[in-house]
Structure formats: structure tokens, C-alpha cells
Image (tube, rainbow, N blue to C red):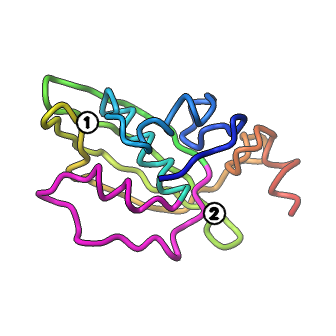
Amino acid sequence: MEAASSSEICPCGSGADYSRCCQPWHLGQPAPTPEALMRSRYAAFVKHNAEYLLATWHSSTRPPELALEGSPAWTSLNIMDNSENADRGTVHFRALYRAGSGWGYLEEQSDFIKQDGRWYYVSGATSEGDHKPGRNDVCPCGSGRKYKVCCLRK
């Protein structure tokens, strides 16, 4: 798997350093919660780490292969809700991505199962659409600036 520079912020949106956030899960440690697994899977999509995505996908629903070429340019993740009960968990999230000159979103209610001490992604009910940020909204690119002074000007 991959290493990262010591000052890289984790793409999962936690604000933490990658080496102290999702990298340990990417290197093989089991994610402690369904939310941690979801965040690490999002980070793996950002980093095009198909090996990790397949390894954390439950064998009952895992595809034989996963090609990430042509994947969207993911820009942010928002965890809207999550729950955990013994060996089952759910995470409701919305992820934003660049879509040509605009923005799109993927929203999903994901199901997870814990097996042999590890959480696995099972499946999710998804919806997608266009994301239209307002001029004064935080820019979806992740800069932290207002949209009107960031990507709207481009």
C-alpha cells in the first residue's frame, strides 16, 4: 500500500493528518467503526486505491475487480448520520465531486457488517445529482474559501 508525507491532510474531511487518520486502515489495521471505514473508503477513492476498496468490501457483494480510471475528482465528504449495533452498522453520507465545469454529489445510505473483528462495506442505496453551491457557500473544492472568491471566478 502507500505511504504519505507527514504533513498531508487526510482527504476524508476529518481535518487530521493522513498518517494519523485513514492511512493506518489503508496499511491493514482494521477500522474501529463503520464511520471510520466509510471515511477510509472515501479516502481510498480519492487516492485511487482499488486494492483497499476491494479488501474492505464484504465477499457477499464484492465485485471481482474495480477500475477507478475515469472516476470523478472527489472534493469533500460529509457524514450526515451513522449508527452501530453489535455487528451491523450504517453510515449516511454525501460526497461532492467535480463534474465538468460544475459539481455533482453522491449520497448514500451504506450498510456495514463486522466479521472476524473487521468492518466491511456490504451495500448502499445511492442517489446522485447536480450540486449548485450558492455564491456565499463554502467552496466545494475544499479550499475553505467562499465559492464566489474561489472556483466561481475560474
Q: Give the residue drawn at x 55%, y 66%.
A: 72
Q: Is residue 134 above or below residue 35?
A: below
Q: Quick check: 81 left or right of 124?
A: right
Provide the secondary structure element on which disc 1 rests.
strand
Estimate the x, y position of residue 108 in percent, counting from the top left.
35, 49
- Viewer-side residue, 71 vs 105: 71
The structure residue drawn at horizontal position 44% and vertical position 39%, both measured from the top left corner, is 39
Q: Alpha-carbon neighbours of circle 1 within 10 Å: few (<14), some, or many (≥20)?
A: many
Q: Does the magenta stretch include residue 85?
A: no
Q: Dot 2 surroundings within 10 Å: few (below 14), some, or many (20 or more)? A: some
Front residue (pair 8, 96): 8
74 vs 84: above or below: below
- What number is the disc on residue 90? 1
Instruction: Give the x, y percent position of residue 100.
Output: 66, 73
Of the numbered discs in the image, which one, if any, rests on residue 98? 2
Horizontal relation, residue 31 to residue 23: left or right: left
Mark earlier in primary sequence (1, 2): 1
Residue 109: percent from the left, percent from the top? 30, 45
- Image vertical order of residue 23 relative to residue 1, above or below: above
Residue 59 is covered by the magenta coloring: yes
The three-letter amino acid code for the residue at tag 2 is: Arg
Q: Which amino acid does label 1 sit on?
A: Thr
Quarter the C terminus occupies: bottom right
Which residue is at 17% across, 35% downward?
114
Q: What secondary structure do most residues of the magenta stretch adopt?
A: loop
At horizontal 38% and vertical 41% (from top left) the residue drawn is: 38
Magenta-colored span: 48-75
Image quadrant where residue 28 sits = top left
Q: What element carries label 2?
A: strand
Tell me the CA gap for discs 1 and 2: 26 Å
